[in-house]
Image: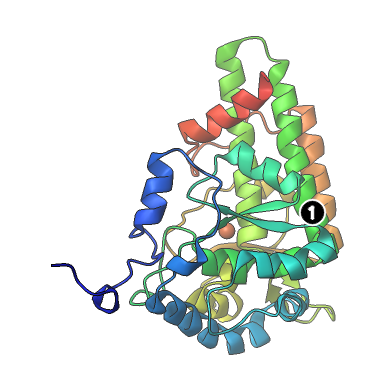
Amino acid sequence: MTASPSATVSPGLTTTKSPFIERAQSEGRLYIEQPYDLYSDANHEAWRALYARMHDRWQKYANHRFLQGIDNLCLDPTRVPRLEDVNKFMAPRTGFRAKAVSGYVPAYMFFDCLRQREFPTTVTIRDGQVLDYLPEPDIFHDIAGHVPMHTDEAFADTLVLFGECARAAAERAADITDPHERVRRVTSVIKAMARFFWFTIEFGLMKSEDGKEIKAYGSGLLSSYGELEHCIVSPDVQRWPFQLEWVVNQYFEIDKYQPLLFVVDSFDHLFSEVGRLAEWVKAGTLDNVSPGEPAISEADLASFLGAAIR
Ligand SMILES: [Fe+2]
């Protein structure tokens, strides 16, 4: 005897508990379709709860272009978004599209997607019982944290330039004949790029338009109820003017609130700093950055080396 359909509880698309994602990963399928019908009621409820409590904090602490981005995307506060709907609002503005993935995208592939105005997007959502902390990205982080900024032209251009940095790093690596030295230098450059990405795109702060306040534009901050307020008001956070020499040498830890953040003046300032990063990649300035976190995985390294010898 089989259970009736109404008695079946959908496994849904919950972070680390989704059979659909496990199957895609075991079959080696990284780029997938968002299986929208698999979202359970609990998944939609998690989205609703996350979105509802962020709303007021965004109004207080988010950069104004993020707030415009939220308006531009017309997200439904009560349902997990469909990526095709997100793209309908985003693509006409900046050409960016959310692209569903089953899991971690190795660093070079991730940056190269940005260069092509594609944003690898997680489709799973965190368990509604643990809204606060999650080591993995989820669709709330990716769509409510990252994607609103991707509707802004200056920010979108910054991400594309970041992808160009990765390409420059791979091209440069192709010219290094000693394999051991190639691995050493590429590892250093990936580390520098990861640090830059962390302290800007994920955890960046920016002066407000009148210069009197500091606002968040980094997605890790904008998708965290607790840290979004903490990063702006806590006396325990150091907030220093952005300095490229420092950022590329600064280690970070991912599993606690950040004690050190960097403040850029404007989106034009951010864009010019990514431009400097690209110049430093080409000049070899990043071949010997400070050791320490983040550790560079075999997959990340292989993705850059694979691009270099293509
Ligand atoms: Fe992120």
Ligand 1 found in image quarter: bottom right
> Measured along the vertical axis of the image, is residue 105 above or below residue 13?
above
Residue at image coords 70%, 27%:
170
Instruction: Please say if 20 is above or below 191.
Output: below
Q: Is residue 218 visible?
A: no
Task: Name the element at disc 1.
Answer: helix
Q: How is the image coloured?
A: rainbow
Q: Horizontal and vertical percent for residue 284?
A: 74, 27
Where does residue 9 sit, x and y in percent of width and height?
Answer: 28, 73
| Residue 52 in sight in this render | yes
Q: Quadrant of the C terminus?
A: top right
- Residue furthest left in the image: 1
- Residues 23 and 124: in front is 23
Choose top left, top right, bottom left or bottom right for residue 51: bottom right
| Screen quadrant of the N terminus | bottom left
Q: Amino acid at mark 1?
A: Thr
Residue in front for this viewpoint, 283 or 10: 10
Counting from the top left corner in percent of width and height, residue 166 is at: 70, 37
Q: Who is closer to the viewer here, 202 or 212?
A: 202
Q: Is residue 288 left or right of residue 252?
A: right
Q: Residue at x 53, y 84 (%)?
A: 78
Task: Name the side, left or right, on which 306 lies relative to 15.
Answer: right
Badge 1: few (under 14), some or many (20 or more) residues near its Cα, within 10 Å?
A: many
Q: Quadrant of residue 267?
A: bottom right
Q: Does 218 appear above or below 75?
A: above
- Residue 67 percent location from the top left of the image: 72, 80
Residue 287, above or below 116: above
Numbered marks: total: 1
Which residue is located at x 57 percent, y 73 percent? 231
| Residue that numbered label 1 is attached to | 158
Indicate if the residue with disc 1 has its beta carbon within 8 Å of ligand 1.
no
